[in-house]
Image: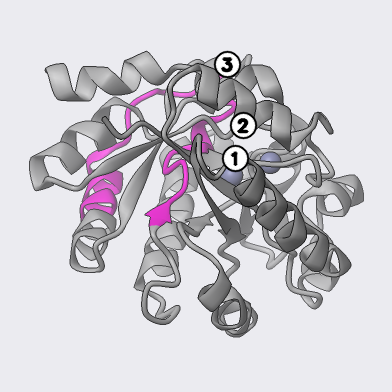
Amino acid sequence: MIKIDGHTHTELCPHGTGEKTSLMIERAIRLGFTEYHLTEHAPLPVGFLANYAGDPENVKTASLSWDQLDDYFALGRRLQRKYHDRIKITVGFEVDYLEDYEEDIRAFLQKVAPQTANNIISVHYLKNSAGGYYGIDYSPAELKAGFGDELTDVQQLYQRYFRAVLASVQADWGAKAIAKIGHMSLIKKYQDYFGLPTDFSQINMNLVGQILEVAQQKKLKLDFNSAGLYKPYCNDLYPGRQIIAQARQLGIPFEFGSDAHGVSEVGRGYHLFEYLDKN
Ligand SMILES: [Zn+2]
Ligand SMILES: [Zn+2]
C-alpha cells in the first residue's frame, strides 16, 4: 500500500523547529509511510520584498534564501541515498503564488523543474486594496493590519483569497511544474481568533468550483493538509468540509500532507485522511 506524506519542511526552514530532517523521515518510516515529499518554501522573488507591507520578520523567516538552494538540493540527495531502501523521498518546493510576480515564479519553476518533483503552489500573501502585500498566516495582527476592513465582512476576504488561488492555478507554469494546490483554505487559519463564519458563501463556492475545474483539467491534486487542526485558532483541516465535498464530487484526488516543520508533526492526523476512502 502506498502511504504518502506529501507536504513537509526541513531543517533548513528558517521558521521551522530546526530538528534534523533525517529524524523526521525516520518517524515517517516508523509510521509506515512509503513516500515522503520534501517541499521546502521556495525563495521569495527578490523584488517582492519592496512591496511587502507587513511585519519584516515574516518575510525574513518565510522561506529558504537564494543562497540556500544548493544546500537544500544536497540535503535532499543525501537523504535519498541514506533511506533509498526504506522510503521513497522526492525533492521539491512549496512555491508562493504572488500576484504581479508570475514571471519570477515561472522563471524559478523552469529552472528547478528538471530536478524537482511534487511541487506545491500555495497562497500565503495577498495584496490588499491599497496595493500592499501582507501575510495571511503569519499572525492575527498581520492579517488585521492588512485586511482589517474585510474581516468585518469576511466573505470579501475569502473572495480575495480564492481569486488569488484561481490565478495561481490558471497561470502557465510549464509542463508538470506544479503537482498540487497547497492548503486551499489557509485564509481560515485565524477563524476562531476573529470569530469568523466557518462556511464559505455561494459566491466563494462558485470560485472554488472554478479553481477545481482548472485543477481537474491540469490534473492537479489537492493538499489534504492536517496542520490547521493543530493551530490554536483554526481547528480544522485544510481545505475543510465544503471544498472536500465539492472536490470529491468532481473526482479530484487528494494527497495527505502533514506540513511538518518538526519531528512530532510528521504524519499527524493521517487517519482522518483514511476517512475519505471509507465514506
Ligand atoms: Zn512553513
Ligand atoms: Zn504553506
In the image, residue 159 lies at what x, y percent? Answer: 41, 50
Q: Amino acid at mark 3?
A: Tyr
Q: Amino acid at mark 2?
A: Ile
User: Mark 3 or mark 1, which has the lower sequence index?
Assistant: 1
Q: Going by the image, does 16 lie left or right of 258?
A: right
Disc 3 element: helix
Q: Magenta stretch: give its range.
A: 180-209
Q: Amino acid at mark 1?
A: Tyr
Q: CA distance from mark 2 to mark 3?
A: 20 Å
Q: Nearer the viewer, mark 2 or mark 3?
A: 2
Q: Which residue is mark 3?
A: 230
Quadrant assignment for the C terminus: top left
Image quarter where ligand 1 lies:
top right
Q: Which residue is mark 1?
A: 83
In the image, residue 180 lies at what x, y percent? Answer: 39, 54
Residue under the point 48% across and 17% down: 31
User: Mark 1 or mark 2, which has the lower sequence index?
Assistant: 2
Q: Is residue 191 visible?
A: no
Q: Are marks 1 and 2 in contact (CB under 8 Å)?
A: yes
Judge: label 3 CB < 8 Å from ligand 1: no
In the image, residue 39 lies at what x, y percent? Answer: 59, 50
Q: Are marks 2 and 3 in contact (CB under 8 Å)?
A: no
Rendered image: mark on residue 25: 2
In which image quadrant can residue 163 be found?
A: bottom left
